[in-house]
Image: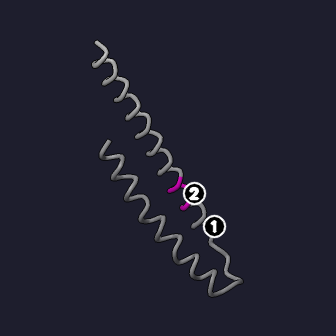
Amino acid sequence: MKKLGLLRLFICLPLIALIIPNVTESLINPNYQVPIIHIIAGAALVAAIAICTIIIYYLQKQQLKVQYQRNKN
């Protein structure tokens, strides 16, 4: 689960690196259009973060169930 947390953290870094230049360029130049590859890459990174988050949530939920079963017996 730690590996998934670290993966989620390091996926955020390229996402931020994509967002910041696009936002600043669009603020400076109103005619700027975000390249489609940046949109696709950003969407893929957000999807990867979401998948990691869902897996972490599921594993934590399973771990709590196991602990509850142990304490119940």
Residue 18 within the magenta-colored segment of the rendering: no
Question: Which residue in the rendered view is the most extreme toward the top?
Answer: 73
Please identify the quarter of the rendering in which residue 73 is found: top left
Question: Which residue in the rendered view is the most extreme toward the front?
Answer: 72
- Depth order, front residue of 52/41: 52
- Which residue position holds label 2? 43
Residue 9 vs 29, above or below: the answer is above
Query: Which quarter shows the N terminus?
Result: top left
Q: Earlier in the sequence, mark 2 or mark 1?
A: 1
What whole-number distance in Å separates the C-alpha atoms at marks 2 and 1? Answer: 11 Å
- Mark 1 crowdedness (10 Å alpha carbons): few <14, some 14-19, many ≥20: few
Q: Residue at x 37, y 59 (%)?
A: 10
Visual colour scheme: one colour
- Callout 1 secondary element: helix
- Depth order, front residue of 66/36: 66
Q: Which residues are magenta?
A: 42-46
Provide residue 36's location: percent of width, then percent of height: 63, 67
Q: Residue at x 58, y 76 (%)?
A: 23
Please identify the quarter of the rendering in which residue 66 is found: top left
- Callout 2 secondary element: helix
- Depth order, front residue of 63/7: 63
- Which residue position holds label 1? 36
Residue 24 vs 18, above or below: the answer is below
Mark closer to the observer (2, 1): 2
Answer with left or right where residue 11 lies relative to residue 46.
Answer: left
Provide residue 32's location: percent of width, then percent of height: 67, 81
Q: Amino acid at mark 1?
A: Ile
Q: Amino acid at mark 2?
A: Ala
Dominant SS in magenta: helix
